[in-house]
Image: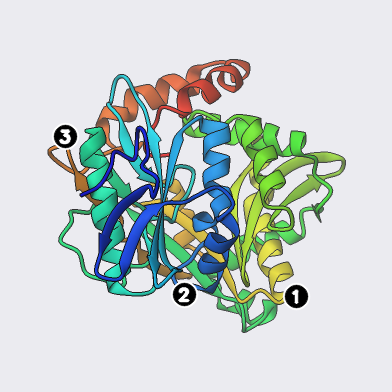
Amino acid sequence: MVNDIHGQRSDSQIIESRAEIQVRRLEPGEEGDWDRFVLDSPFGTLFHLSGWAKVTEAVLKCECFRLVAFRGGSISGVFPIALVRNVVLGNSLISLPLAVYGGICANDSDSYFRLLDAGSELANRLNVNYLEMRNRFNPYAVSLPGRDLYLTFTQDLSPGPERLLQALPRDTRYAVRKSLKAGLQWTEDLSEQEFYEIYAHSVHHLGTPVFPRALFSKLREIFPGQVRIFGVRKGKTAIAGVMSLYFRDIVMPYYGGALQGYHKDSPNNFMYWNLIAQSCQEGAREFDFGRSKRGTGSCQFKSAWSMVETDLPYKYHLVKAKEVPHLSPIDKKFQLPVAAWRRLPFGWTKVLGPKVIRWIPSI
C-alpha cells in the first residue's frame, strides 16, 4: 500500500491514498503552502508552522517527518512529527518536541483520520515506544489513550488592564501592586545573553537541564517578529526575563525565569503583569500562559491568576510501550535525579544540560 517513508522514497513519496485524500511527506519548496494552511486553520498554532520543525532539527538534531494531506490538489491537513532517540528509554515519535501544542492540524475528519493512520503506521514501522500527539484541540473523537497531566491557562485581554487587575484574586493583586512599588523597571532591552543566564539559573533551581543557548537564537532567526525578549531590571541588574511567542493575536510567554535573590520584590508578578498590560495596549486578544503539569509550582502560580484552565487532550498511539509514558518531575522515580541536578554547580549545568535534554522525550 505504501513505501517506507523512513528509507528510500518512491517517485510520488505517497504514504496513503484513500478516496480523494492523499497523504505524503512534504516536498522541498512546499513550506509556504503548509504555513498558509496553518495560518488559515482554526486548529493551527505557531508550533504547526514549518519553522518549528526546523528549530527542532537544528537544535535537538531530531529527524522530522512532515506529513501532509491533500484533497483535490490542495492541502487539507498537516502533521509534523519528530523522532526522539534515547538509548536508555527507547525511541519515540513526538508531535512536537519543544512545543506545548502539536498533533494533527486538519479542517475535516477525513483528512484528520488519514493523517492519524499515516502517523500510526510510521510509528509501527519505526518500532518506537509510542507516538505522542500534543493536541491543543480535540475536534474529532479518537479511541486512543491519554494522560490527565497537563493544563493550559488563557486570559481574554479585551477588558483591558484596569479591569483585569481588579479581577485578579486578592493575593495575586497584592503581589502585583507590591512589585509595582519595588523600584523595578520593565524593559525590552534585555540581551539574549542576559536572558539566558537568568533562564539557566531558574531551571537549575527547579532541577531541570537547561536548553542550549542556540535554541533561543534559532527561534529568533526562524520567527522574526514573532519572538520577543522582555525583562525586568532593578537598577542596572537584569533580575527576570521572558521570551514571548506571538501567533495571530495571541501572546504566549514561553521561556522565562527570575533570580532567586530578588524573590521579595515579586519580579515574576511584575513581569507577567507588565506583559499582560502591554499586550492589551498592543491589541492582542488573548494571553496564553501555556501548559503546566498538575501538582507543580508552575501550575499553582498560574492558577493564582484566575485564568481559564483547560485540560490538554494529549493522545498516544502505543507501539512497544504497554502504557502511556509517565515522565513528570513530580513522579517519585524522578525525585532523586531532580535533587541531584539541583546540587550540581551552576556552571556545570550549562555545559551538561544541553547534552542531556535532547534525549528527554517529554521536552
Q: Of residues 132 and 104, which is closer to you in this image? A: 104
Q: Amino acid at mark 3?
A: Lys
Nearer to us of marks 3 and 1 is: 3
Q: Secondary structure at mark 1?
A: helix
Q: Is residue 345 visible?
A: yes
Where does the image place residue 121, in percent across and percent down from the top left? 23, 46
Q: Secondary structure at mark 2?
A: loop
Q: CA distance from mark 3 to mark 1?
A: 50 Å
Q: CA distance from mark 2 to mark 3?
A: 33 Å
Where does the image place residue 216, in percent across and percent down from the top left? 66, 40
* First in residue order: circle 2 vs circle 3: 2
Where does the image place residue 103, in percent across and percent down from the top left? 37, 56
Left or right? Give the position of 290 relative to 22.
right
Left or right? Give the position of 311 relative to 322.
right
User: For mark 3, does the 10 Å Cα neighbourhood hold few (<14), some (14 to 19), or many (20 or more) residues?
Assistant: some
Q: CA distance from mark 1 to mark 2?
A: 25 Å
Q: Quadrant of the C terminus?
A: top left
Residue at 84%, 48% in the rendered image: 189
Q: Is residue 128 visible?
A: no
Q: In this figure, which residue is indicated by the disc labeled 1?
A: 281
- Residue 169 position (above or below residue 96): below
- Residue 300 position (above or below residue 280): above
Q: In this figure, which residue is indicated by the disc labeled 3?
A: 320
Q: In this figure, which residue is indicated by the disc labeled 2?
A: 42
Residue at 62%, 84% in the rendered image: 159
Image quadrant in which you'd find residue 322: top left
Q: Residue furthest front?
A: 11
User: For mark 2, does the 10 Å Cα neighbourhood hold few (<14), some (14 to 19), or many (20 or more) residues?
Assistant: few
Cβ–Cβ below 8 Å for labels 3 and 1? no
Q: Secondary structure at mark 3?
A: loop
Q: Amino acid at mark 2?
A: Pro
